[in-house]
């Protein structure tokens, strides 16, 4: 099913769960994400970052994801992740992305508001929803994202930002990092609660990789509806490729075999995140379902 990102996230907000937004850059990453979502019967957001525009045929990619989403049994949305250029946003809107992220986090609040507002006006005319960020997510290890200065989101500014720009989802910087943590994660869940009390739109958490499970569960309880994941999946695939390369007989292996294995190596990592974000245990507990009985089914 092809779905609008906003519809997916409003459902998540009402159901108190989060949807995985997996960063993709190849056919295998898209296939892995949709296959896992179908097996787990959960919606999924396919996210292509502007940084991959030089290596990915954006229009061809969008057509491919739309075709795959069209025959999928679960809701699939197509999102533009971290775009810094208006031209990239217009390009994504033209070829059918269902949401775009404008990242003006490096500008001061006033300028971020002005720039984001303009993007919202353009996107909304085309029926496309917009995510934006205030505060800034720092970069940890093995990440492919731009480095941010790690400034946390100020709740009052978040309130003003959402009211003045009309964004549909807000990425809140609460101490997660893009990539793996190099020390003890310092994630300010109390700050998230304060942001939540000022902002009604669904909240987005960047930097899903390496974030402890209990922090993720608590963040979902405090209003996070979309969680972006990239690095952990990349690491699983790279480890797999290196294993093949280290094998003396690697030259005898066909590339198609390696690609199929690479997809298989990503799926368990994606499954772990989809299950955690779906908060099934909590849902079943709320519905009075016996978890042991459920597991044995
Ligand atoms: P990770 O690489 O930490 O999973 O974060 C991805 C992300 O937030 C992309 O926007």
Image: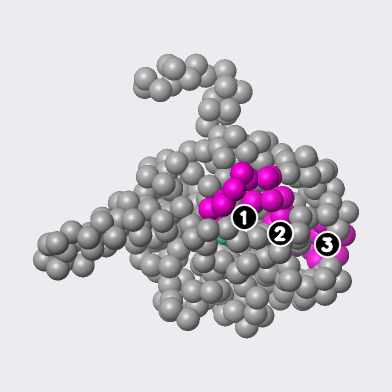
Measured as percent of width and height from the top left, residue 167 is found at: 75, 62
Measured as percent of width and height from the top left, residue 258 is found at: 23, 61
What label sits on residue 177 in the rendered view?
1
* Numbered disc 3: secondary structure: helix
Q: Quadrant of residue 248?
A: bottom left
At x 57%, y 40%, the residue is 212
* Numbered disc 2: secondary structure: loop
Measured as percent of width and height from the top left, residue 269 is found at: 41, 47
Residue 161 in the magenta stretch? The answer is yes
Closer to the camera in the image, 177 or 111: 177
Residue span colored magenta:
158-187
User: In the figure, is residue 8 to the left or right of 65?
Assistant: right
Q: Nearer the viewer, mark 2 or mark 3?
A: 2
* Numbered disc 1: secondary structure: strand
- Badge 2 vs badge 3, beta-carbon distance below 8 Å: no
Up the image or down, 210 lies above or below 137; here it is: above
The chosen color scheme is one colour
User: Which is more N-terminal, label 3 or label 2?
Assistant: 2
Q: Is mark 1 within 8 Å of ligand 1?
A: yes
């Amino acid at each position: 099913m092809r779905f609008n990102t906003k519809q997916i996230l409003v459902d998540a907000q009402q159901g108190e769960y989060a949807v995985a937004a997996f960063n993709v850059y190849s056919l295998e990453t898209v296939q892995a994400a949709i296959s896992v979502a179908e097996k787990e019967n959960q919606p999924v957001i396919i996210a292509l970052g502007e940084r991959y525009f030089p290596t990915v045929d954006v229009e061809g990619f969008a057509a491919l994801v739309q075709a795959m989403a069209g025959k999928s049994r679960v809701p699939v949305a197509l999102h533009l992740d971290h775009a810094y250029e208006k031209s990239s946003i217009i390009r994504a809107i033209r070829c059918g992305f269902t949401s775009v992220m404008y990242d003006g986090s490096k500008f001061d609040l006033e300028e971020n508001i002005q720039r984001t507002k303009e993007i919202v006006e353009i996107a909304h005319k085309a029926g496309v929803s917009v995510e934006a960020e205030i505060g800034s997510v720092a970069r940890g290890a093995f990440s492919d994202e731009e480095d941010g200065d790690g400034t946390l989101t100020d709740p009052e500014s978040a309130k003003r930002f959402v009211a003045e720009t009309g964004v549909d989802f807000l990425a809140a910087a609460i101490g997660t990092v893009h990539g793996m943590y190099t020390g003890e994660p310092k994630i300010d869940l109390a700050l998230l609660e304060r942001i939540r009390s000022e902002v009604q739109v669904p909240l987005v958490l960047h930097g899903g990789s390496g974030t402890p499970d209990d922090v993720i569960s608590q963040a979902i309880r405090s209003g996070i509806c979309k969680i972006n994941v990239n690095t952990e999946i990349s690491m699983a695939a790279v480890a797999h490729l290196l294993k093949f390369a280290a094998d003396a007989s690697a030259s005898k292996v066909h590339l198609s075999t390696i690609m199929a294995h690479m997809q298989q190596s990503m799926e368990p990592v994606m499954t772990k995140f989809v299950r955690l974000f779906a908060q099934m245990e909590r849902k079943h507990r709320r519905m009075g379902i016996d978890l042991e009985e459920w597991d044995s089914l």
